[in-house]
Amino acid sequence: MSPSAARLRASPLFWPLPPVLVLVPAGLILAMTLAGTWGQLGWRALDWVYLSSQVGAQARLPAVVAAGAAALVAGRFTRRSLVFAQPWQPRVERDVPLRHAVVVVGWCLGAYLVGLLPLTGAVATRGAGSPDAAAVAGALAGFVSLTLLGYLCGVVARGLLAVPVAVGTVFLLTSLVFVSDSWTALSLRLPFDPFLGMREAAALGPYRLGFFLLLTVAVAWTVLWLLRTPRRFSAVHGVAVAAVAVTMVLPHLRPFPLVTRAPGPAVCDERGGVRYCVHEGHAEELTAVTGLAAPVFDAYGPTDALPREVRDQSLSRGDEEVLDGPGQDVLWLPVYPGWDPYQQVPAAAAEWVAPDVDRCGSGSVASLDHNAEPEERRAAVVYGLKAWLASQAFEGDAYGNDLFADADPEQVRAWIRQDRERLVSCEVDPEELPWRT
């Protein structure tokens, strides 16, 4: 067998393209996807809602690479100087661009899906909730349509110039979601990462999927029209392009709601008169929440200042309920994929019971310098108290402020009971602390 025949037989998955034109972008996409998700494999509180959103979120840059690869293929293999790409050849109208698209999309999308497998496995092992099929389908359809849009740029530019044009166009389209929420229905992802307890709005996913399917049809038809000689007007092609234009305008006239709340059953515990509840899917986090918040509340002392309940935000029915939490004596904790309870829970508990530093009148500026204003020195007492309270979740190993470094817990509790009104009003100077006199 001749070397040329062996190469042809060994690369049926690439024909009619040189393997390097698809293997390089596919390898880059695989590396980018693995790099973007590898650090998430050990995250706490992973769930299927988050993974469904990541299918679109992680596709942003891989889609740009795939579009650039498609533009390079079209620019090289559809230009009129090639003997096999003459406009009068019937196979150019459909067969050649179809084969190009199948090879580029197949390898690039396949590499992207392989890159998502480790994160999918991690979520399948311990994740809660259920996948959002509409969000996943819309993201994958968007990947395909944006890749074909890159191919269209290559057909139009017919040269290496097509690559930066395609890369810039697709990058811009995938970035518009961060400019205005109206672009969310036309983008691969939400402008933020949803998690357990919320889902994409019911109409958003199907609309996104429909838009990208329409865009795929319109782009494919436009490619065929540009490669055809003579170019004849097609009513169906015109309708497809007009439909894409209409679907791009509608979300700007009346933006879609982005997410809806989907609170599930709660798992609860009680300690020290405070009830702790998390979403059923976050049951493994309940021990950490209780164990880190209860010591902070115990260290503060007065029970009337404690929240009635500490709740996982995945149990909320809306943003209003979370914002009204202090009025209902409820401390809401955001439990989301990748959260660190050891940092967030003690800080949130200390923030709840400690005075509001804005009452000091220092503009949140705290200082213990001799030339500092009295308001700034009193603010330092409040900040020091918060740091000390948060440290009690770790048995006081890290005080974080010299003001409370030598304080005994019983002494601090007694001081809070005695000077609580002055403390709440931010009237306590550093020199007045009992263990510093």
Image (tube, rainbow, N blue to C red):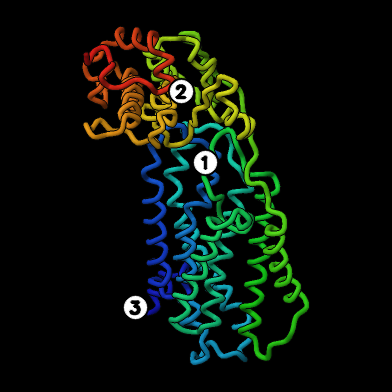
Residue 262 x %, y % = 64, 33
Secondary structure at numbered mark 1: helix
Of label 2 and label 1, which has the lower sequence position?
Answer: 1
Residue 63 x %, y % = 49, 62
| Residue corresponding to mark 1 | 50
The amino acid beneath tag 3 is: Pro
Residue 410 x %, y % = 31, 7
Of labels 2 and 3, the one closer to you = 2
Crowdedness of circle 2 by 10 Å Cα count: few (<14), some, many (20+)? many
Left or right: 398 in relation to 288: left
Q: Is residue 376 above or below residue 311?
A: below
* Residue at image coords 66%, 75%: 221
Secondary structure at numbered mark 3: helix
Of labels 2 and 1, the one closer to you = 2
Task: Say which quarter of the image contains residue 259.
Answer: top right
Q: CA distance from mark 2 to mark 3?
A: 75 Å
* Residue at image coords 56%, 63%: 144
Q: Which quadrant of the rendered structure holds the C terminus?
A: top left
The amino acid beneath tag 2 is: Trp
| Residue corresponding to mark 3 | 3
The amino acid beneath tag 1 is: Tyr
Q: Nearer the viewer, residue 381 or 19?
A: 381
| Residue corresponding to mark 2 | 352
Q: Nearer the viewer, residue 131 or 336?
A: 336
